[in-house]
Amino acid sequence: MSSAAQPDRRPTLEAVARLAGVGRGTVSRVVNGLPGVSAKARTAVEAAIAELNYVPNPAARSLVTSRTDSIALVIPESESRLAAEPYFAAVIRGVSSELADTEMQLLLILVRDRRELDRLIRFVEARRVDGVLLVSVHRDDPLPAFLEKTRIPTVLVGRRSVDEPLSHVHSDNAGGAAQAVRLLLDRGRTVVATIAGPLDMDVGDSRLQGWRDAHAERDILPDESLVAAADFTEEGGRAAMGELLGRRPDIDAVFAASDVMAAGALTELRERGRRVPEDVAVIGFDDSIVARHTVPPLTSVSQPTEEIGRTITRLLLDEINDPAAPRRRFTLPTTLTERRST
Amino acid sequence: MSSAAQPDRRPTLEAVARLAGVGRGTVSRVVNGLPGVSAKARTAVEAAIAELNYVPNPAARSLVTSRTDSIALVIPESESRLAAEPYFAAVIRGVSSELADTEMQLLLILVRDRRELDRLIRFVEARRVDGVLLVSVHRDDPLPAFLEKTRIPTVLVGRRSVDEPLSHVHSDNAGGAAQAVRLLLDRGRTVVATIAGPLDMDVGDSRLQGWRDAHAERDILPDESLVAAADFTEEGGRAAMGELLGRRPDIDAVFAASDVMAAGALTELRERGRRVPEDVAVIGFDDSIVARHTVPPLTSVSQPTEEIGRTITRLLLDEINDPAAPRRRFTLPTTLTERRST
DNA sequence: CAATCGAGTGGGAGCGCTCCCAGGGGCCGG
DNA sequence: CCGGCCCCTGGGAGCGCTCCCACTCGATTG
């Protein structure tokens, strides 16, 4: 057939127009599903498109519309976290599924060091994406501020503080934590410690706040010697547990702000001969696969991770379509899954 | 300052040229680091770029070079896997780190159903990426064939069969499996069963082959009643273990082709009152976080997942730069990590 | 029956860049 | 002192698309 001289050149709008016997404008209208095309012309164009196997050149389109039809998912985390936490994978799944019936594409950007950060900044400045999804926000993270300044549509998972101006979605961290601590108190535990997450993150902060709230409800003055912060890693959780036990040997329950830290705590408890749940009850957060496989399996607060992914995507798409609309926030509910560690 | 009339228009090459008092060609040469620019001109251009905060428009560039400076990582898996397996996360990290000192961007594409597959095909046909990384290949997967036909640079993780024509990287599945089984036999186990992965995948196949090889080395005729295939899920592993025990109550060791399946097997063994490792020794594959938290912790074959990510990326970049070069393949070594399940 | 209208259409202009070629010096050797 | 070279340099052409405006033509209206 058309195995002519041309090397590997794909058919253009122009070629389709010629074959269909119409103008470029008409083809463009058909391709973009715009109105104002007669049935006859539309049929002819569609036939030509099929025959030539025409696919529009996105770069050319992007050049004139200055849209890229893609969004970035930015994960600013140290090596270890993406590996250990199924959390990110679930968010990715949610984002991807929400994007499935769109023409939008997903760019994944891991930011682990200064170099990668600079790269991201250049990238956003070049407007290579229509919007940005930012997962895991630290209080003094320069990234949200940068995105705000650039005025690129942005949605965060988590927030810098309670009055975050950017659109964001987070789970009810304080509520979930409080629910966990309430369960422990209800079961008759009296010395409930907590292994908090990084306190420069709202997640860390809020989960700790939940622990305080649950105590306050019962008119118990939460004792700050029962708090140790860690960095969401297993090793950190283990060290924090050691520290707590050193300070307060009378601890009979622990609420950890993540399953991975709870797993570390379990190791430390076992090492020190404390039985779980007989001597010390333990609750984690995330309800990840780890929770089901520890000894004993962990009671854990689960957040709707995939739903978070879906929600941020929906918000971002709305914001891209109407950049003038006000920013929005969503708090998603958590649930408590009880296992044998309590 | 320059808060003039223009709405939000970013500076163009032209503007930089004007400010620097040179022509567009010179600016383009500076931006792309091409030779043939006098020191004086280069300095002037660099100053102008800094002053205007100029960033090239990738769409315009792409239109003329027909390169997109991005690659796609395609993960064609059912919902469950991305969640359960840290494997993918590690590969992503490897890819991302290898891309870090490149201008290349990473597009993540999850393909879970027909709709998403069609979307991917359209996407590749529009040449929206310079190359494709395909993780987790099934024997009859139409995707590799499609990519081959399209002649877009492609690198696979895994292969359709032993004579895969496309570039690919995989770990020494058969070797790792054989090593595991050898350990079991060396420890005096005599009835070593295996929970194989999906047999329509080379990983599944090869790991099973390793089990056979290790038996053959010892002149043991591997008994096919000791083989049960599952789908890499925990539930599947558990069911397979039940099946095996039903057929052969005398089993004293099991090699599972993934940690997650091994975890399922452990559950089933416990349920049936078999002690691990006293009655039955168990080995998994992947050395994932799950392996460290099962009861008892799993001995497991670990593959260099992050290195796999790095290697495929390197291969793909080479292939993009020289599409005529011959296809390449790499087999990466596995190692055995011993824990208390053996 | 002329004037008016709106639906449908074709194609010029232009998005911002790279490619490439023609041309302007400066410097060398004859 | 002139021809020949080699560096640099500027800018025309063109990538494939959307936007928009001017135009045609049949149908409707006074």
Image (spheres, coloured by chain):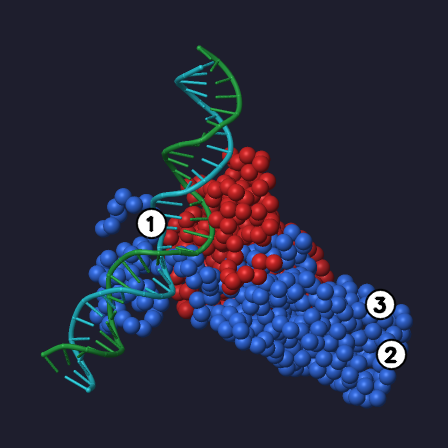
Chain colours: A blue, B red, C green, D cyan
Relative to A301, is A102 on the left or the right?
A: left
Mark before the other along the chain sequence, 1 or 3 = 1
CA distance for labels 3 and 2: 17 Å
Mark before the other along the chain sequence, 1 or 2 = 1
Q: Position of residue A22 (x, y in %)?
A: 23, 62
What subunit carries mark 3? Answer: A
Q: How many labels, in total?
A: 3
Residue at 46 percent across and 61 percent down: it is: A66
Q: Position of residue A297 (x, y in %)?
A: 70, 75
Relative to B320, is A177 on the left or the right?
A: right
Q: Amino acid at mark 2?
A: Asp
Q: Give the class, few, some or many, for how many residues have Cα within 10 Å of label 2's Cα (few <14, many ≥20).
A: few
Relative to C1, is D23 on the left or the right?
A: right
Q: Which residue is mark 3?
A: A242
Q: Is residue B186 visible?
A: yes
Q: Is residue A90 visible?
A: no
Task: Please tell me in which quadrant of the rendered image residue D17 appears.
Answer: bottom left
Question: Depth check: B46 or A73 in front?
Answer: B46
Q: Position of residue A225 (x, y in %)?
A: 87, 74
What subunit carries mark 1? Answer: A
Q: Which residue is mark 2?
A: A223
